[in-house]
Amino acid sequence: MKKSIFGLTLEQLTVWLLDNGQKKYRAEQIWDWLYIKRITDFSHMNNVSKECIELLEENFVFYTLEESVKQESADGTIKFLFKMEDGNLIETVLMRFKYGLSVCVTTQVGCNIGCSFCASGLLKKSRDLSAGEIVEQIMKVQQHLDELEKEERVSHIVVMGIGEPFDNYTNLMGFLNIVNSQKGLAIGARHITVSTSGIVPKIYDYADEGLQVNLAISIHAPTNELRTRIMKINKAYPIEKLMDAIDYYLKKTNRRITFEYILLRDVNDHVEEAWGLAKLLENKRHLSYVNLIPYNPVDEHGQYQQSTPEAITAFYNALKKKGINCGVRHEQGADIDAACGQLRSKQIKKADKAKI
């Protein structure tokens, strides 16, 4: 099976070309065709030698993802369901904001983290995505935008789709290198956010990378007892260990961290939990931002419901009174399968029923 051409960093492509008897400068020419001109056929590279084009065609393909379903929301959000070469399905979401166009990418087929409220974990992880498969999600969305002929471009990326990014660390780093490169898509590091459920050893590694890419932590509860009930990863990496890793990250990078907090009705949305969260973040308030997220109900997780507007407001006000910077995330794509993993799960169920 040929690999995606989008899986190579500029440095890796340069080495590959040199190893195959090609000139070093070809790498930047090829990247210009891929990411600036965004062609979809190697033969269109008219300043690249025929020999080099044949070599690329023998070893690489452009797209391994095929659009299976596309859902468009009234607010401009578009959710794509892509079918991969092995038949697996993944989700990618385009969101429109005043500051630009943001794409949420998937890093794994399924998820093993097992958060009790999340649709992504309904199907266990079967494999990691390659760096190329993650980059392809951005390129497929950009291809959609190019076809609209509005000269729009993807300006922001959030790595918050299906899977745990830090559980696919090497391919995640390759992806970030590619999309951030000034000779490629040139999406600014500060316009990219990686979200983790809290794999502590990788937070230390990430801090040592020296990246300007933003970090978000899914916290969802201020105590070990409650967080373990909601997120089983807390058994392996309890809050004390997570906070130690975060302190290391803040000291090493001096960069702000976003704490994501999904509000679940009568579970973690009381003022007491807000006070507990404020206490947890007390010594890092200057580099913390809490993103309060209204819950998107998932049929399979019927025990959870969205918090009332009154509870959300009370939680927000309690944090603000304690000096914690926070905001409530505006719900995107409410009229489509908004929850992460929901569209994929529904499509797989339909396919299974069709087999019966």
Image (tube, rainbow, N blue to C red):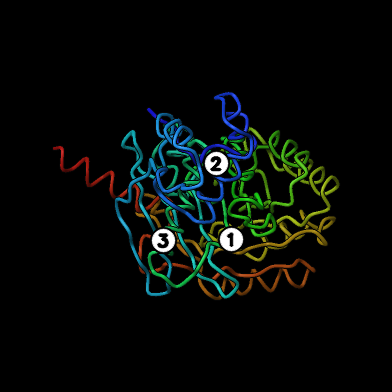
Depth order, front residue of 100/233: 100
**Disc on the earlier residue, 2 or 3:** 2
Amino acid type assigned to the residue bearing label 2 in the image: Glu
Question: In the displayed structure, does residue 351 sit left or right of residue 295?
Answer: left
Q: Position of residue 269 (x, y in %)?
A: 59, 62
Residue at the image point whose x is 85% and y is 55% from the top: 283
Q: How crowded is the residue under tag 3: few (<14 C-alpha within 10 Å), some, or many (20+)?
A: many
- In the picture of the structure, the residue carrying the numbered disc 3 is 338
Q: Which disc, if any, is residue 164? A: 2
- In this view, the mark in front (3 or 1): 1
Depth order, front residue of 127/262: 127
Q: Which disc, if any, is residue 350? A: none
Q: Position of residue 54 (x, y in %)?
A: 42, 33
Depth order, front residue of 90/42: 42
Q: How crowded is the residue under tag 2: few (<14 C-alpha within 10 Å), some, or many (20+)?
A: many
Question: In the displayed structure, does residue 260 sit left or right of residue 341?
Answer: right
Amino acid type assigned to the residue bearing label 3 in the image: Ala
